[in-house]
Image (cartoon, rainbow, N blue to C red):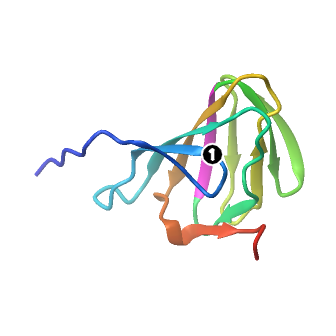
Amino acid sequence: MPTVLPAPDEFWTAERCFITELHNAPQSPEASLARARVEPGVTTQLHSLTGVTEVYIVQQGSGLLEIAGARLRLHTGDRAIIPPGTPQRIHNDGAEELVFLCLCTPRFVPAAYVDLESS
């Protein structure tokens, strides 16, 4: 039987960015898709995802992505693949909001998130 899910709302996270979960459902465990929005001057929380590969697809703005200590410049249209368990964060050093899609495989669950700043 088909499942219809309600339209998602954007929410603020402790990661210091806004998230809209476009698709994240137990009925589809193979992947989830979220939209992240980072305000100018903000650096997201250093973290990793246990057992989850994450792909960032930049829709707007630019920023400096840090993956396992390496820094990569990202612009609109760029993509970055972040392997499971890899320390990561992104800094919006531009004048406009940084907006990117986060494709997680398998789907993101809160138990996979590891805060590397507080631990």
The quadrant in which residue 69 appears is bottom right
Residue 105, relative to residue 79: is it above or below? below
Residue 49: x and y in percent read 63, 64
Task: Find out whether residue 58 is within the magenta segment.
Answer: yes
- Left or right of residue 24, residue 95 in this image: right
**Closer-to-camera residue (15/74):** 15
Q: Residue at x 69, y 51 (%)?
A: 82
Task: Find out whether residue 14 is within the magenta segment.
Answer: no
Residue 88: x and y in percent read 75, 55
Residue 27, relative to residue 11: is it above or below? below
Residue 114, relative to residue 105: is it above or below? below
Q: Amino acid at mark 1?
A: Cys
**Closer-to-camera residue (13/79):** 13
Q: Residue at x 39, y 52 (%)?
A: 24
Q: Residue at x 69, y 35 (%)?
A: 39
Q: Which residue is mark 1?
A: 17
Q: Which residues are magenta?
A: 53-59
- Left or right of residue 65, residue 111 in this image: left
> In this view, which residue lies farthest toward the bottom?
119
- Left or right of residue 26, residue 19 in this image: right
Query: Local crowd at mark 1 within 10 Å, few (<14), some, or many (≥20)?
Result: some
- Left or right of residue 77, residue 20 in this image: left
* Quadrant in which the C terminus appears: bottom right
